[in-house]
Image (cartoon, rainbow, N blue to C red):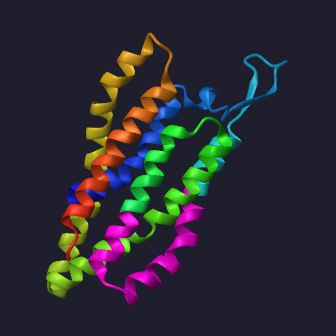
Amino acid sequence: MFVGYSLVYYDKAILGGATIFGLRTDLNLSVVVDPTTTPPTISTRRLSWATSLFYFGMLAGLFPLTYLFQRFDVGKTIGTVVIIWGAVAMATAGVTDFRGLYAQRFFLGFAESIVPTAFMVIISGYYTQAEQTWRQCLWYSSTGAMTVVGSVSGFPLKLKAQGDQQSLTVFCITNLLFSCSTTALLTSTMPH
């Protein structure tokens, strides 16, 4: 669960790293609103919406996916949603403008909304109430660990692309690598 949740978390962190590496210009996420000032005034509203739409998708997906999770087999429901999540995460490689990123981030949030709830239910099925808090803190702490690991793993890709000015390519490669890993790991380790 520690590794699985850290990989699920990293899809959010990849977007932040990619914007630093130049994704804002590649997908037209920042717009010059006043070129007469020095430096020109830039609006990053599109980037803010791309980030926010992920969480709107989470809100939209929480009720229907939790309902499915309660009505059907835990492992099969989570496995199916994780495969859908992986497909949506891998679809990031096909994004060519901010509109595509908006749609992708919304559906990624929708599919990902069940993961924390599912992990809590799985923990509660295997551990006593006194043991659950520590286990949940442990898998949730993986977000900080993945921040470090993700930064270290993304750095060589950035160095490679720095001369080529291919920030979108770096974003796609990183996202494909981690979303494939997450999908494989989570679907193979879910309870049956």
For residue 86, side relative to residue 123 (left or right): right
> Among all residues in the image, which is located at the extreme bottom?
71
For residue 89, side relative to residue 184 (left or right): right
Report the magenta residues as a range.
54-82
Query: Where in the figure is residue 43, as x and y percent of width and height?
Result: 73, 35
Classify 15 as above or below 60: above
Is 182 part of what is drawn in magenta?
A: no
Q: Residue at x 14, y 82 (%)?
A: 127
Is 67 part of what is drawn in magenta?
A: yes
Q: Please say whether residue 175 is visible from this viewpoint.
A: yes
Classify 8 as above or below 28: below
Query: Where in the figure is residue 6, as x and y percent of width and height?
Result: 29, 53
> Among all residues in the image, which is located at the extreme top?
163
Q: Residue at x 23, y 56 (%)?
A: 185
Residue 74, by quadrant, is bottom left
Query: Where in the figure is residue 133, as x and y percent of width and height?
Result: 22, 76
